[in-house]
Amino acid sequence: MIFQPVGETGRYRYLDVLRGIALFGVLLVNLLTGFRMSMFQHFAQAHSHPGRVNWLVDTLVATFVEFKALTLFTFLFGVGIAIQAERSAARGVPVTPFLLRRFLVLMAFGLAHMFLIWNGDILLLYAVCGLLIVPSLRLPPRVLALLGFAAILLPSFVSLNFHFLSEAAMRAHVEAANRVYAHGDFLEILRFRSSEAVRLVLPLLWGVLPRTAGLMWWGVAAWRSGLLRKPEDHRGALATLLIAGVALGGVASFLHSRFEDLFVIIPLASAYAGAVLLWYHSGGGRAFAAAGQMALTNYLAQSVVLGCIFYGYGFGLFGRLDPTAGLGLAIALYVIQLAASLLWLRRYRFGPAEWLWRSLTYGRIFPLRRGE
């Protein structure tokens, strides 16, 4: 028997729209805090450039976008796992081996992305978490939701991060990063990025692994429970999610708590999801679907383009662009990606990275052009 990936008619367009919109938030945060300057400088310095407008951009992004877009993106990855498992079982494909192959291929993508392009990668983390939750996929949705809740709470009670650099060592590292990323050639940046990934980034990923797995468990549970299968039948619940999420997240954002994730970040991300789904089922948002369908390609393309803009082997704007200009650049790049995704999918079945991921997972080359 030859197994095929899902075709156009099997897609849930509202999930593509959600993913496509979350992708803009991921691009904006990555540009402002990971490419425009050292991500470790961002940890130590809230506002990187003077001026009221720059302060406003920094504050609004930190309050309403940072961690929220990634939270939604991660949750949707969990939803995708549930859908893949469900479809594989329906076609008679052994679910566990299929998903293991899928995540191992994604792990290869993540390692290449982290060391060759940008070490703020999330694909490696997603692959590891996917491998961890595969054995639990047959559990009831309530159990999956409880596992997710426990995993998300875990970092609030148990420190999973390594002993971070001293303030002096961090300043020295940021100075070195500013010098190498802004002026180094490709090989110099590759060496520095690889060292930074091993010494600093991978330990940080270990610290956020439980939260990431928890959000994926919630995504699986939400799909398995039926909450996301027909959102148009739950408009009242979506409106409640929107209002409650904004109210709880907005109020709790003024309270500094170790439970910020549960009371601020996740409620606001949930509110955004509710708003987008209501908008979609009122006839809006279709233009974002193509970008969401090509999320892997667009995510990787963002890193390649931003590397060429900011690093020394490109235009060398690292450390020179203020937040306001960064916001404008993010909007421009995203609009280009929206248009490029629409044009690409008129001629091709999948995005390039999605096609490669599918082909490697299934062990055969699939036609890429429409009509083949």
Image (cartoon, helix red, strand yellow):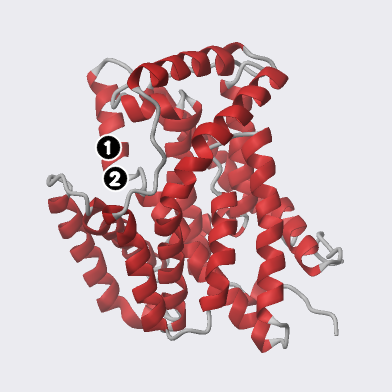
Q: Secondary structure at mark 2?
A: helix
Q: Which quadrant would the N terminus be assigned to in this image?
A: bottom right
In this rendering, position of residue 319 left or right of residue 155: right
Residue under the point 65% across and 85% down: 89
Residue at image point 71% right, 82% down: 94
Q: Compare residues 368 and 81 and report the one nearer the observer.
A: 81
Q: Which residue is mark 1?
A: 60
Which type of secondary structure does the marked residue at label 1 adopt?
helix
Residue 287 x/y as whole percent: 52, 56
Rendered image quadrant of residue 64: top left
Question: How would you rate the neighbour count of disc 1 (Cα within 10 Å): few for under 14, some for 14-19, many for 20 or more?
Answer: few
User: What residue does disc 2 label?
Assistant: 64
Whole-percent x and y of residue 317?
53, 16
In three-dimensional space, the C-alpha distance between marks 1 and 2, rounded to whole angstroms, equals 6 Å
Image coordinates for residue 236, horizontal then vertical, percent: 25, 77
Q: Is residue 278 something one can see in this rendering?
A: no
Is 106 left, or right, of 217 in this rendering? right
Q: Are marks 1 and 2 in contact (CB under 8 Å)?
A: yes
